[in-house]
Amino acid sequence: MKSVDAHLAQILATVRPLAPLELDLEQALGTTLAEEVSSPVPQPPFDNSAMDGYAVRARDVVDVPVTLAVIDDVAAGSSELRAVGPGHAVRIMTGAPLPAGADAVVPVEWTNGGTVSVTIDRAPVAGNAIRRAGEDVQAGEVVLKPGTVIGPAQLGIIAGVGRRRVLARPRPRVVVLSTGAELVEPGLPLGPGQIWDSNSVTLTAAVRESGAEGFRAPTVGDDPAAFLDQLDAQLVRADAIVTSGGVSMGAYEPVKEALTPLGTVDFEKVAMQPGMPQGFGVVGEDQVPIFALPGNPVSSFVSFMLFVRPALAKMRGLPAGSPETLSAQAAAPLRSPAGRRSFLRGVLSSDGTVSPVRGQGSHQLAALASANALIVVPEDVTEVPSGAVVEVIRL
Ligand SMILES: Nc1nc2c(c(=O)[nH]1)N[C@H]1C(S)=C(S)[C@@H](COP(=O)(O)OP(=O)(O)OC[C@H]3O[C@@H](n4cnc5c(N)ncnc54)[C@H](O)[C@@H]3O)O[C@H]1N2
Ligand code: MOO
């Protein structure tokens, strides 16, 4: 059997980062920056007030209370400014440019709020409540580096330095395709022998949570030709395809039957539990990566976390590898089949212990939904005593 690490290594050697595109601000959230972004001007671009109050010369407000003549009123956005001379004050709002001559701002709370003259009863130090030009960023300074994921604050600084478009790797478009004649759309009634399709819902959500765009394609039955038709139809909008079901040893395995003759997708047994049967390769003219995951609900989800998620990270231009683990103490004894790496479903507590959930079958989706971690038991370990230290992957 192929090892988990060898399977991931093959996947990561195959998938490529998506080519960067010029994206509008509206499209850039969640994408990966592929250029340096710098500010053409200092930020703030000019000295300005940090508070609503009065711009003054600090040396005029040493002995308080003192009354000064209010010679002007400046709001944020004002451009015509009168200089502050001896005995003068200018009423100023937060963000408004500091008039020449002034070297301190007195918050309105320290005054009587006058508009013709103002009485100030607390002395400011020079520089009080002034935000200096360039205090955040110097002109030409780099504010974001390539490889940064653009979240809300990063998008904000891109806009804040005046950019409308940015060069970034887009979020991969991933089509999720469930197969199985027994599958019924959630919300519709079940007939005999049928179950509701949960895998495509889980996997599409997992795609989105991995920073990619997930599209849930219509489910196909057990017919390899119908599967290939659906695949063909979906390939036009896909940077990657994830399928579920139809990859094991049964009489009707549409994914395996349809893809094996192409010669570009391998179906193998990977030494893990759950998730042993795995298909991976490329399809179509553009050599789109395809992940043919096993149909058991827990198996497909665990496979996604171990193989698809790192691949999506690589496609996004981010560091990619095995999921991060942390150490925890097993709160109960654990069992694992010899020669396979187990990913048991567990609940990780804040006290650093992890308890396996009841129901470790690869069909037990409700048990998975009650877990917040996968407990990793190595290939050469079959029993873990209670209290032993184990590695866990947070879900
Ligand atoms: N003789 C063998 N039988 C099986 C083997 C084996 O090595 N030899 N491997 C087992 C393992 S391990 C797994 S995992 C499954 C994988 O099966 P398939 O990928 O072919 O998946 P299906 O047979 O289509 O379905 C398996 C199971 O999962 C349910 N399922 C499928 N799709 C969905 C969906 N979208 N939503 C919810 N549930 C789904 C399906 O009804 C089956 O119960 O094979 C074992 N058998
Ligand atoms: O390996 Mo299968 O994925 O256990 O259920």
Image: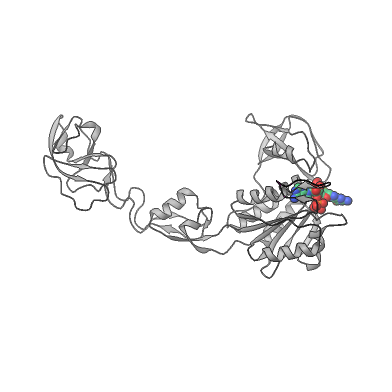
Which percent across, then down, holds residue 123? 20, 32
Please indicate whether residue 182 sits to the left or right of residue 92 in the image: right
Name the dominant secondary structure of the magenta segment. Answer: loop
Q: Residue at x 54, y 63 (%)?
A: 20
Region rendered in magenta: 185-189
As drawn, 365 above or below 179:
above
Residue in the foreground of this view, choosing between 353 and 228: 228
Q: Residue at x 53, y 56 (%)?
A: 32
Q: Quadrant of the C terminus?
A: top right
Please indicate whether residue 72 sits to the left or right of residue 94 in the image: left
Residue 229 picture quarter: bottom right
Which percent across, then down, holds residue 258? 80, 64
Which percent across, then down, holds residue 140? 37, 58
Name of the residue lying farthest toward the right: 251
Which percent across, then down, holds residue 320? 63, 53
Q: Could you tell me if residue 315 is visible in this image? A: yes
As drawn, 325 above or below 238:
above
Residue 84 picture quarter: top left
Magenta span includes 188: yes
Please indicate whether residue 34 sits to the left or right of residue 91 in the image: right
Magenta span includes 387: no
Residue in the foreground of this view, choosing between 17 and 247: 247
Residue in the foreground of this view, choosing between 340 and 73: 73
Name of the residue lying farthest toward the bottom: 285
Q: Could you tell me if residue 271 is visible in this image? A: no
